[in-house]
Image (tube, rainbow, N blue to C red):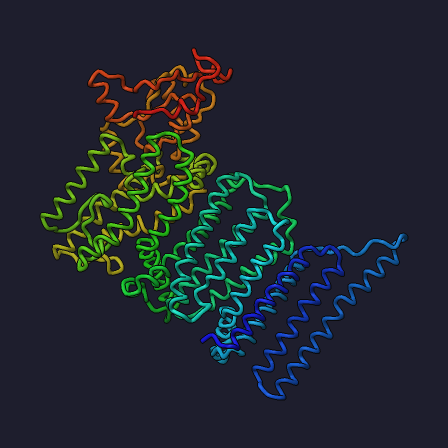
C-alpha cells in the first residue's frame, strides 16, 4: 500500500536524485584538485546523513538516535579535512609560483572515478537501506555468514529506492551534461537508465514484474539493434567508446543471467552485483567524459577479438533473456523441462552434471518460442535496415520472403499453430522423425505423416533444382535472417582476414571442408540408424534420455550453430555454408549441382576491364574466385554459392545477374535470356569518364542500371 510515509520518502528520493546528479555533473566539470575535493566532501556529507539514519532504524529509540548522530557527526568532521587539505595544497602551490597563479590540476584517472562512483553508490545504498527500513520492507536475515550478508545487501540494491533513484540520477545527469556527451554514448546511457528503471525485482507486484519483463526486454532488444546498426554505420569507433560498449554488454549478459536466477530460484545476488558493476562503468564514463572526444579511433572490422566479444556478450544476454521470457510467459511449459541434475557430491560428478545442465539449458532455450521470437525481432530489424538500402527488386522480394519464412517456420507453426490445433502432440524437437531439417527420417511413421515428409522433400528439392540452394540457405532456413542484417553482413570482411576463414575462400572444397562435411553426414546417417533400431526395439540407446537423431538435431541447430555464429570474427561469415557442417545445406547443395542455378554476366569484356572486383568483396561466403570465371567463361557455378545476391547489387556496371529456371525458360521459348533493361550498360572506361557507353553525360547513374533485373 502506498501511504503517506512512502509518499514523503519518494519526494525525498527525487530530491536526492536531483542533488546527486548535480554533484556528479560537478565532478565531470572539475578541473582543479580543490574542486574535486569539494565534490568528495559533499558526497561524504550525504553518506554521513544516510548512515546516521540507518543506525537509528536498526536500533530505534534514544540510544539509536544518539549513535546515529555521533556517526553522522564523525563522518562529517572527517570529510571536512578533504577540501581543507586541498585548499592548503593549492595555497602552497600558489605561494610557490612567482606570479601567484597555478592551482593544482585535478588528474582524473581511474582512481578518481572509482572514488566518486564508490561514494555515490554508498550514498544510494545507505539511502535505499534507510528508506526500506523506514517503509517497513522486510529484508532477509543477515545471519548465516557471507551468504546471508550478500542476500541482505542484494535486497537493498534491488529495492525501488535504490534502482529507481539510480535510474533517475542517470537520466538527470545525462540531461545536465547533454552538451558535452557524444550522441552515441548518450543514446547508450539513455537505454541503460530506462532498462534499470524497468528492473523486475524492484517491486513485489505481479503486474509490475510482467510489464517490466516485457518492456525491459524490448528496451534491451532495441539497445542491441542500435549498437549493431551503429557499428555498421561507423567502421571506425572512438577507442574509449568501443571499450565501454563491450563492457556494458558484458554486464548485461551477467544481468540477464541474474534475472533468470531471480525468476527461477528467487535469488537476486547476481542481478544486484551486475547493477553495481554497471554503475561503476557508468561513473567511470561520466566522470572522465572528455576521453570520449579523443581522436584515437579503431577499425573494429580489423579487430576480431573485439567483434567476438561483442557478439558473445549479446548472445549470452539474449540466451538468458529468452529463458526468463519463457519462464514468465510460458511457466507451465518451460519450467518443467529445464535440466535439474544435482550439483553436489564428488567433483567429477559435479562437473559432469554441470556440463549436462549447461548443454540442455542452452539447447532448450535456443529452440524455445520466446527466444526465437526475440532473435527474430532483433535480427529482423537489421534486415529491415538492409532492405532500405537494397535497390534490386529481386533481392528485396527475397528479403521479405526470408523474414516471413522465419516468422512462420521458427515461431508461428512450431509454437503457436501446432500447440493450438494439436494440443496433445509432442514437441517437434522431441520427435525422432524429422523432415527436411534433418534430411533423414528415423522411425516408423504413419502414412499421412510420411506423405507430408515426402512432399516436403519433393517441394524443397524441386525448388532447389530450379532456383538453387538459396531456396534453403537464403530464404526458408532461419539462419539467413541472422546472417543478412546490416551489421552481421558487414562482418564478411573477416572471411578474408581471419586465418581460419581464409582456408575456406573460393569455390574449391578444402580438405578441412571435406573432413567437416564427412563427419556431419556420417553422424546424420549413423544417428538415423540408431534411432530406427531404438524404435523397433533392437536397441535402447539414448543420449541424455533423448533419441539420437533428436540429440543430433539439437546439437547441430540449437547449440553448435550459435557457437559458430558468435565465432564469425574467427571462422568467417556464413560459416555453416563455407565450412560444410550443415547437413541440410549439403543436401540442398546436391540438388543445386543438377539444377539451373548459376551466376552469369552480360558482357565478359566488362569483367575483363574491371579493376574493382566488387562482386567478390561483397560475397558473404568468400567466393573470391568468381571474377576469374566471369572473365573467361562468362558464368560461375559453385556449390557454396547460396544466392544472397550481394554480388549482383555490388557490381558497379550492372553486368551481373542470377540465372535460374526463369532464364532457361525464356531462352527455351526463344526470348532474350535477360530482358532489355532500357538503358545502355555502363562500361568501366565510360564510368571513369562519368558517362555511359554510347549515351550522353546525363544518363542514369550506374547504381540504377546495375540494379535492373528480371521483372
Q: In which quarter of the image is residue 34?
A: bottom right
Judge whether 659 appears above or below 264 on screen.
above
Image spot of residue 565 (x, y percent) = 39, 45
The percent coordinates of residue 494 (x first, y second) are 46, 38
x, y percentage for residue 697?
48, 15
Residue at 37% across, 20% down:
630
**Residue 486 appears in the figure:** yes
Q: Residue at point 20% right, 57% down?
A: 426
Tell me if 300 is positioned left or right of 332 in this view.
right
Q: In this view, does 253 lie to the left or right of 85?
A: left
Q: Quadrant of the C terminus?
A: top left
Residue 572 visible, this angle: no
Residue closest to the far right: 98
Q: Is residue 102 left or right of residue 505?
A: right
Kindly identify the residue that appears in the image at 43 percent across and 65 percent down: 200
Q: In this view, does 699 lie above or below 333?
A: above
- The quarter of the picture where residue 123 lies is bottom right
Q: Which residue lies furthest to the front in this view?
A: 4
Outermost residue toward the left in this view: 447
User: Does 501 sit above or below residue 219?
Assistant: above
Q: Nearer the viewer, residue 704 or 643?
A: 704
Amino acid at each position: 500500500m502506498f501511504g503517506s510515509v512512502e509518499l514523503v520518502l519518494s519526494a525525498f528520493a527525487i530530491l536526492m536524485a536531483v542533488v546527486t546528479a548535480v554533484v556528479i555533473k560537478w565532478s565531470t566539470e572539475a578541473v582543479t584538485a580543490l574542486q574535486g575535493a569539494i565534490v568528495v566532501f559533499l558526497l561524504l556529507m550525504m553518506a554521513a546523513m544516510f548512515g546516521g539514519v540507518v543506525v537509528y532504524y536498526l536500533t530505534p529509540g534514544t540510544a539509536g538516535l544518539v549513535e546515529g548522530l555521533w556517526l553522522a557527526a564523525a563522518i562529517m568532521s572527517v570529510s571536512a579535512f578533504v577540501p581543507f587539505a586541498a585548499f592548503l595544497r593549492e595555497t602552497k602551490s600558489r605561494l610557490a609560483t612567482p606570479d601567484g597563479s597555478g592551482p593544482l590540476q585535478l588528474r582524473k584517472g581511474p582512481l578518481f572515478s572509482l572514488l566518486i562512483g564508490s561514494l555515490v553508490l554508498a550514498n544510494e545504498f545507505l539511502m535505499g537501506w534507510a528508506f526500506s527500513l523506514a517503509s517497513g520492507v522486510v529484508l532477509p536475515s543477515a545471519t548465516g555468514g557471507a551468504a546471508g550478508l550478500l542476500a541482505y545487501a542484494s535486497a537493498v540494491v534491488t529495492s525501488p529506492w535504490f534502482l529507481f533513484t539510480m535510474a533517475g540520477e542517470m537520466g538527470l545527469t545525462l540531461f545536465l551534461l547533454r552538451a558535452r556527451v557524444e550522441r552515441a554514448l548518450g543514446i547508450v546511457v539513455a537505454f541503460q537508465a530506462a532498462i534499470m528503471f524497468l528492473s523486475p525485482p524492484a517491486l513485489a507486484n505481479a503486474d509490475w514484474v510482467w510489464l517490466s519483463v516485457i518492456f525491459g526486454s524490448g528496451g534491451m532488444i532495441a539497445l542491441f539493434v542500435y549498437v549493431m546498426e551503429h557499428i555498421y554505420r561507423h567502421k571506425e569507433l572512438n577507442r574509449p567508446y568501443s571499450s565501454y560498449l563491450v563492457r556494458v554488454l558484458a554486464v548485461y549478459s551477467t544481468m540477464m543471467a541474474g534475472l533468470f536466477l531471480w525468476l527461477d530460484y528467487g535469488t537476486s545476488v547476481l542481478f544486484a552485483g551486475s547493477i553495481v558493476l554497471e554503475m561503476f562503468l557508468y561513473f567511470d564514463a561520466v566522470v572522465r567524459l572528455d576521453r570520449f572526444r579523443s581522436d584515437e579511433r579503431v577499425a573494429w572490422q580489423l579487430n576480431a577479438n573485439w567483434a567476438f566479444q561483442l557478439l558473445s556478450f549479446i548472445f549470452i544476454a539474449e540466451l538468458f533473456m529468452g529463458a526468463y521470457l519463457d519462464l514468465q510467459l510460458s511457466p507451465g511449459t518451460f519450467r518443467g523441462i529445464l535440466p535439474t541434475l544435482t550439483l553436489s557430491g564428488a567433483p567429477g560428478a559435479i562437473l559432469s552434471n554441470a556440463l549436462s545442465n549447461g548443454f540442455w539449458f542452452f539447447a532448450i532455450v535456443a529452440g524455445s518460442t520466446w527466444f526465437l521470437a526475440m532473435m527474430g525481432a532483433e535480427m529482423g530489424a537489421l534486415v529491415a535496415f538492409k532492405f532500405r538500402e537494397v535497390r534490386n527488386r529481386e533481392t528485396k522480394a527475397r528479403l521479405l520472403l526470408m523474414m516471413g519464412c522465419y516468422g512462420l517456420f521458427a515461431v508461428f507453426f512450431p509454437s503457436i499453430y501446432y500447440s493450438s490445433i494439436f494440443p496433445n502432440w509432442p514437441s517437434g524437437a522431441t520427435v525422432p522423425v524429422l523432415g527436411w531439417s534433418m534430411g533423414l527420417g528415423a522411425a516408423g511413421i504413419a502414412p499421412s505423416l510420411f506423405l507430408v515428409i515426402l512432399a516436403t522433400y519433393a517441394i524443397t528439392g524441386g525448388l532447389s533444382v530450379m532456383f538453387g540452394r538459396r531456396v534453403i540457405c537464403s530464404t526458408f532456413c532461419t539462419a539467413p535472417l541472422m546472417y543478412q542484417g546490416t551489421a552481421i553482413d558487414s562482418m564478411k570482411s573477416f572471411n578474408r582476414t581471419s586465418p581460419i576463414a581464409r582456408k575456406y575462400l573460393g569455390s574449391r572444397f578444402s580438405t578441412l571442408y571435406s573432413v567437416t562435411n564427412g563427419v556431419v553426414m556420417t553422424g546424420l546417417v549413423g544417428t538415423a540408424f540408431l534411432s530406427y533400431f531404438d524404435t523397433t526395439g533392437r536397441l535402447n540407446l539414448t543420449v541424455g534420455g533423448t533419441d539420437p537423431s533428436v540429440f543430433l538435431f539439437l546439437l547441430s541447430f540449437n547449440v553448435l550453430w550459435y557457437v559458430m555464429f558468435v565465432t564469425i570474427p574467427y571462422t568467417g561469415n556464413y560459416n555453416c555454408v563455407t565450412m560444410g557442417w550443415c547437413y541440410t545445406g549439403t543436401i540442398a547443395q546436391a540438388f543445386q549441382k543438377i539444377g539451373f542455378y548459376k551466376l552469369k554476366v552480360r558482357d565478359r569484356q566488362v569483367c575483363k576491364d574491371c579493376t574493382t572486383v566488387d562482386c567478390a568483396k561483397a560475397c558473404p561466403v568468400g567466393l573470391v574466385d568468381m571474377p576469374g570465371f566471369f572473365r573467361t567463361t562468362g558464368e560461375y557455378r559453385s556449390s557454396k554459392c547460396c544466392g544472397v545476391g550481394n554480388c549482383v547489387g555490388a557490381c558497379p556496371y550492372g553486368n551481373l545477374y542470377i540465372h535460374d529456371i526463369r532464364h532457361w525458360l525464356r531462352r527455351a521459348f526463344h526470348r532474350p535470356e535477360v530482358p532489355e533493361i532500357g538503358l545502355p550498360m555502363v562500361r568501366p572506361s565510360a564510368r571513369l569518364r562519368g558517362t555511359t557507353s554510347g549515351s550522353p553525360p546525363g544518363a542514369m547513374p550506374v547504381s540504377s542500371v546495375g540494379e535492373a533485373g528480371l521483372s
